[in-house]
Image: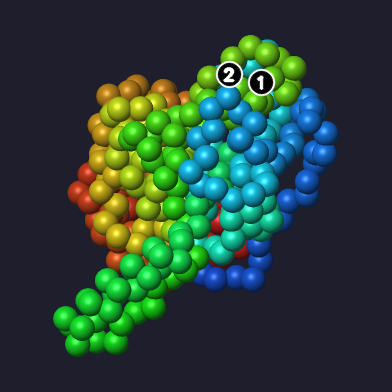
């Protein structure tokens, strides 16, 4: 693989592997709604969609009310048959409705406006854990504290999971991507089926757990075998799935011709907050012998 530097406001290009930290900042990217009608214009845009209207609803088990997925796209030519797809897994947040999704969208970093390639961004809403799940977690934390003689940690009540997408080794994610591509093709008037050109999976904070589990199935499903992975303060435990995917990707890219890496090469970017719960596991992943570490700092308001 070929490794090179990136600006902090860019998604990684093919053939890059980066690890770094970011410094907190009050700045956050924002986006304006561009659509109120059900039809899609020829240029860039976005729309909040409720997957309950789809033939197959991959987010049924997530519950909640209102729109449960945000779709954002760049300019896509009418004759396009394959486009890039970016799926982002958001982190901890209370709520399970459309307003929560809109809040997450404001700082998710799912900004495809700077991409030249035709791209569809997908931001699914997670499932907020129940009060019973919080109590069960607290009981486990209390028992661990009793055994260690330390003060128990407090269980979080804002944890979001993605069971609908994790089902059957990533079949749910596969259905989400297929449904989003079909929706976009129908709404844009093209009608012809769209396929994936490059697949990019990104996660922030607690969304990293779902991302890691999904890419562990990289040998089984295209939806779980992305061309790029981006994790932002998202590795709270050992990233076995990401390591397995990256190892396979490095092996595949080493067999490519150098002139193929610009279009076919893989990319991995991992950012963490210094002295946080994600630093240990992020740096441990970076120390894997088959990876090349390229350190970079970036403010939190400029996550890719």
Q: Nearer the viewer, residue 28 or 155?
A: 155
Callout 2: SS: loop
Which one is earlier in the sequence, the residue at label 2 or at label 1? 1
Q: Residues within 10 Å of mark 2 (few under 14, many from 20)?
A: some
Residue 133 placement: quadrant: bottom left
Q: Residues within 10 Å of mark 1 (few under 14, many from 20)?
A: some
Q: Quadrant of the N terminus?
A: top left
**Which residue in the rendered view is the most extreme toward the front?**
132
Q: Position of residue 204 (x, y in %)?
A: 49, 56
Callout 1: SS: helix
Q: Is residue 24 above or below residue 217?
A: below
Picture mark count:
2
Give the side of residue 293 with respect to residue 234, left or right: left
Q: Position of residue 267 (x, y in %)?
A: 41, 40
Give the side of residue 142 with respect to residue 131, left or right: left
Give the side of residue 151 with respect to residue 57, left or right: left
Residue 179 placement: quadrant: top right
Question: Which residue is found at the position 67% from the left and 51% from the top?
Answer: 98
- Which residue lies under the disc numbered 1? 185
Q: Position of residue 118 (x, y in %)?
A: 63, 27
Asked whether the residues under the numbered discs 2 and 1 touch, taking CB atoms below 8 Å apart as contact, a structural biologist would say: yes
Give the side of residue 1 with respect to residue 233, left or right: left
- Which residue lies under the disc numbered 2? 194
Q: Taking the image as drawn, is residue 283 in sight?
A: no
Q: Nearer the viewer, residue 103 or 265?
A: 103
């Amino acid at each position: 693989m070929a490794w090179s530097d990136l600006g902090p406001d860019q998604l990684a290009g093919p053939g890059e592997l980066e690890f770094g930290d970011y410094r907190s900042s009050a700045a956050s990217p924002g986006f304006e709604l561009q659509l109120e009608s059900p039809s899609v214009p020829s240029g860039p845009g976005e729309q909040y969609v409720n997957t309950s209207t789809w033939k197959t609803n991959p987010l049924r088990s997530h519950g909640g009310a209102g729109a449960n997925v945000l779709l954002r796209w760049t300019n896509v030519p009418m004759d396009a048959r394959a486009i890039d797809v970016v799926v982002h897994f958001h982190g901890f947040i209370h709520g399970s409705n459309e307003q929560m999704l809109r809040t997450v969208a404001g700082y998710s970093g799912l900004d495809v406006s700077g991409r030249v390639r035709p791209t569809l961004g997908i931001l699914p809403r997670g499932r907020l854990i129940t009060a019973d799940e919080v109590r069960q977690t607290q009981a486990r934390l209390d028992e661990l504290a009793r055994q260690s003689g330390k003060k128990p940690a407090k269980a979080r009540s804002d944890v979001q999971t993605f069971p609908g997408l994790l089902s059957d080794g990533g079949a749910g994610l596969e259905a989400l991507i297929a449904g989003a591509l079909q929706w976009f093709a129908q709404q844009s008037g093209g009608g012809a089926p769209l396929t994936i050109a490059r697949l990019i999976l990104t996660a922030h904070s607690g969304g990293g757990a779902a991302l890691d589990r999904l890419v562990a199935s990289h040998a089984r499903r295209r939806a779980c075998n992305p061309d790029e992975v981006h994790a932002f303060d998202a590795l709270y435990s050992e990233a076995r799935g990401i390591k397995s995917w990256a190892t396979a990707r490095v092996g595949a890219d080493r067999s490519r011709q150098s002139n193929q890496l610009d279009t076919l090469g893989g990319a991995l970017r991992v950012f963490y907050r210094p002295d946080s719960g994600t630093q240990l596991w992020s740096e441990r992943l970076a120390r894997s012998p088959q990876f090349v570490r390229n350190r970079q700092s970036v403010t939190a308001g400029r996550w890719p």
